[in-house]
Amino acid sequence: MDDSPPEPVVATAPAERFSSGVVLAIVGTFLFALKSIVIKLAYAADATSLDVLAVRMAMALPFYVAMLCWLRRPSSENNRRPITGTQVAVAMVLGFLGYYLASYLDLRGLEYISAQLERLTLFTYPTMVAVLAAMFLKEPLTPRIIAAIALSYAGVFLMYGQEARTSPSGAVGWGVALVLGSAFSYSLYLLLAKPMMQRIGSRRFTSLAMIGSTAFVAVHYVAAMPVSNLLKLAPVVYLYGFVLAVVCTVLPSFMINESIVRIGATRTTVIGTVGPVLTMLLAIVVLDEPSTIYHAAGMLIAVLGVSLVAVR
């Protein structure tokens, strides 16, 4: 899952700054799209979903601790906004939804469905945010949003139907349900986290949420299996964990943030909608996953639907 920063006011950028922003958005989107592929490769090396999550979080933790320390330096603007113990606790607890539960359900779902279907199902979270905002924040469900929801789930259903025909009974349905649960958890996180991000800053909030989620992962792992199991994993699993933590999480999150600053949130979001398509292509090339015209049609329909919500 990736941090969604508040939209800044962007001035007209020089050509070079604009071009570099587009490149950052494209590269960041590509790196995010790698996530499902790397997880599938880790599964092929006999790692479980909990193994992958634990290694990923352990690898990412030092970067977010370093970010938090950097933000606490005397010259940082964050020091002008003191943070309370309650805010620290709330940020860490919200990390449970956004980076522990959502990540765990997503990883579990990938055990049952293709990387293509997982990415497309997870990509529906903006429509969930829109529905939750309508329910709890009284934001209107416009005809455009309703059309977006219909298209998004029509695309998922089309791809689901194709995979269900060639998979064990119930496996694809269970996998989709887990990933939908992941998307819902992340949607709740975004809705609840926004006010806190505005109070203490998105980077400081995200760092605290990641640290809190790592603690939840550690508790889960210790409760579920001996910690010594982590030492028995194939060496390549640690490599995949590092790639997931740094290449697929830390680096693209900073790239997307900087892209928003340079070219604006709307253009960055438009570029980001090609993420599921990139995942599909990578799944076919790297994982040799089967793909049909139904996969392509479902992907395009869902991407169109999400675009209606994501782009204002």
Image (tube, helix red, strand yellow):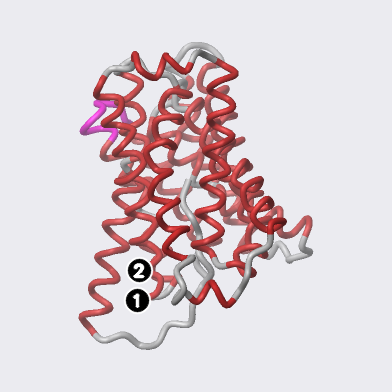
Residue 288 in magenta? yes
| Secondary structure, magenta segment, majority class | loop
Residue type highlighted by circle 1: Arg
Residue at image coords 53%, 72%:
78
Dot 1 and dot 2 residues touching (CB under 8 Å) = yes
> How many marks are shown on the rendered structure?
2
Q: Position of residue 128 (x, y in %)?
A: 63, 50
Q: Position of residue 80 (x, y in %)?
A: 57, 77
Q: Which residue is mark 2?
A: 259
Whether 150 is drawn above or below 81: the answer is: above
Characterize the local packing of mark 1: few (<14), some (14-19) or many (20 or more) Cα atoms within 10 angstroms: many
Q: Position of residue 190 (x, y in %)?
A: 61, 55
**Which span is picked out in magenta?**
283-292
Q: Secondary structure at mark 2?
A: helix
Q: Which residue is mark 1?
A: 262
Residue type highlighted by circle 2: Ser
Q: Secondary structure at mark 1?
A: helix
